[in-house]
Image: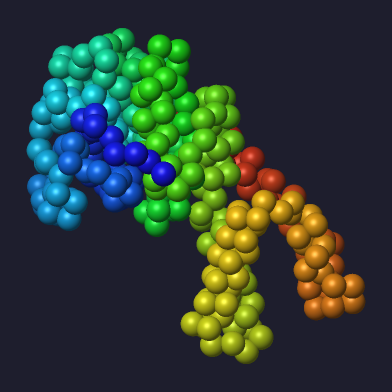
């Protein structure tokens, strides 16, 4: 559980990922947010009771921990605007996809500490998975503060940056793959005679409940699978088809392609 944070926290950008983090914070009294869209900024300020400004430099001047939550193509423009007013002791926390620490250092200069985060879409449901890395020189207390904030929106783990392409493939892109699996299960249910709404509910709740049980119990995956597969039963019949297929090879190839693309985009 995240403790109330007394440091001034800022956001460059008020998009959905930023809102996912913001909505999970138990104390928003020291938050200031900037965005180029006045309507969006007003919505965020009204919904969460935070200070708001259309000028990123106001955030840079007043916040000590600042989330960079803009589109990748806008990161350089924001950095150019705020670099002259950034100070030693501040930390930039990037959730921008594909921007490595070396790139962030070139953009923001030597003064601020840096933290890079790879979040996923489930932040918006307070069930996100975030990977965190930081270069030498970033204060450990800043890294801890970032981890505490993100843990309020799900789970957060500190990993070396060399792992981030794999993280991007597995948890960053993973929500789409899980939704694809749910779609396949629901469509198969409809083919067996179920109504579409019922098929989706059955597939979705089954996936959610299984993940929740495994997460909370810590049970190893293979014994769980074997425990559900009663010899000669329905699950075993289905698993026989899956085991005979290229399912695991397809999954491995999917993640490999995503990881390779992540490296290309960096």
Q: Quadrant of the N terminus?
A: top left
Location of residue 70 by image quarter = top left
**Name of the residue lying farthest toward the right:** 232
The residue sitting at 55% across, 65% down in the picture is 208
Residue 56 visible: yes
Q: Is residue 258 above or below residue 144?
A: below
Location of residue 9 by image quarter = top left
Location of residue 141 by image quarter = top left
253 vs 158, nearest the viewer: 158
Compared across the picture, whether 65 is left or right of 151 comes to left
215 vs 225, nearest the viewer: 215
Q: Which percent across, then down, holds residue 56?
A: 15, 31
Compared across the picture, whether 184 is left or right of 38 comes to right
The residue sitting at 23% across, 39% down in the picture is 13
72 vs 202, nearest the viewer: 202
Q: Which percent across, then down, holds residue 14?
A: 23, 44
The residue sitting at 24% across, 29% down in the picture is 7
The residue sitting at 74% across, 51% down in the picture is 220
């Amino acid at each position: 559980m995240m403790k109330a944070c007394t440091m001034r926290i800022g956001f460059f950008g008020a998009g959905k990922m930023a809102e996912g983090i913001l909505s999970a914070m138990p104390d928003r009294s020291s938050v200031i947010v900037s965005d180029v869209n006045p309507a969006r900024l007003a919505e965020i300020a009204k919904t969460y009771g935070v200070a708001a400004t259309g000028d990123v430099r106001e955030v840079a001047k007043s916040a000590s921990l600042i989330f960079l939550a803009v589109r990748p193509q806008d990161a350089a423009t924001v950095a150019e605007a705020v670099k002259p007013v950034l100070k030693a002791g501040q930390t930039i926390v990037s959730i921008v996809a594909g921007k490595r620490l070396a790139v962030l250092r070139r953009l923001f200069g030597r003064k601020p500490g840096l933290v890079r985060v790879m979040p996923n879409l489930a932040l918006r449901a307070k069930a996100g998975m975030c990977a965190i890395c930081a270069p030498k020189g970033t204060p450990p207390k800043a890294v801890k503060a970032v981890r505490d904030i993100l843990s309020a929106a799900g789970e957060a783990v500190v990993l070396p940056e060399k792992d981030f392409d794999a993280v991007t493939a597995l948890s960053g892109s993973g929500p789409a793959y899980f939704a694809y699996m749910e779609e396949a299960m629901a469509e198969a249910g409809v083919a067996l005679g179920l109504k579409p709404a019922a098929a989706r509910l059955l597939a979705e709740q089954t996936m959610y409940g299984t993940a929740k049980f495994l997460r909370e119990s810590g049970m190893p995956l293979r014994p769980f699978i074997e425990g559900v597969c009663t010899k000669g039963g329905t699950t075993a019949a289905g698993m026989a088809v899956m085991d005979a297929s290229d399912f695991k090879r397809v999954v491995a190839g999917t993640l490999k392609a995503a990881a390779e693309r992540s490296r290309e985009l960096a």
